[in-house]
Amino acid sequence: SQQYDRALDAYQRLLALSPNSVDILNELGLTLHYLGRSDEALSRLNEGVAIDPKHQRIRLTLGFVNLQLGNLKEARAALTAATQLGTDEGVRQSAREMLQKLPQ
């Protein structure tokens, strides 16, 4: 519902309760990006990757945010990882579609 300020507060409270939750860090990172705080978003997303390098969705989000910022090398690496990790075919397909849009 695009209430990112409220979502930010909620995710920060949840993260305080579960500081190693990659799913919360993923949502927090995406929310920060939509609030225009992309550097902070990348930091949170990279925290999540450090906790669980095989987490497919956070790699997709990291790729998306990097792509939006024009960080093509980082976007390609994260999106490629999202196509190779996990079992969620929807995430895999989203990553493939974003990779196809990257300049060669």
Image (tube, rainbow, N blue to C red):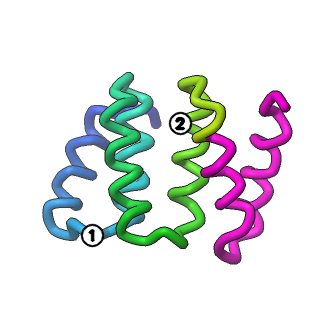
Residue in the image at 48% along x and 68% along y: 53
Where residue 101 sits, quadrant-wise, is top right
Q: Are marks 2 and 1 in contact (CB under 8 Å)?
A: no
Looking at the rendered image, the quarter that the C terminus falls into is: top right
Secondary structure mostly taken by the magenta-highlighted segment of the chain: helix
In the displayed structure, would residue 2 be above or below residue 98?
above
24 lies left or right of 66: left
Residue in the image at 46% along x and 37% along y: 1
Numbered circle sitting on residue 46? none
Dot 2 amino acid type:
Val
x, y percent for residue 10:
24, 50
In the displayed structure, would residue 2 be above or below residue 93?
above
Q: Which residue is mark 2?
A: 65
Q: CA distance from mark 2 to mark 1?
A: 21 Å
Q: Which residue is mark 1?
A: 20
Where residue 73 sits, quadrant-wise, is top right
Check disc 1 and report its element: helix, strand or loop.
loop
Q: Is residue 88 magenta?
A: yes
In this orientation, which residue lies closer to the viewer: 79 or 74?
74
Magenta stretch bounds: 75-104
Where residue 41 sits, quadrant-wise, is top left
In this orientation, which residue lies closer to the viewer: 69 or 37?
69
x, y percent for residue 77:
64, 49
x, y percent for residue 97:
81, 45
Q: Does label 2 or label 1 sit earlier along the sequence?
A: 1
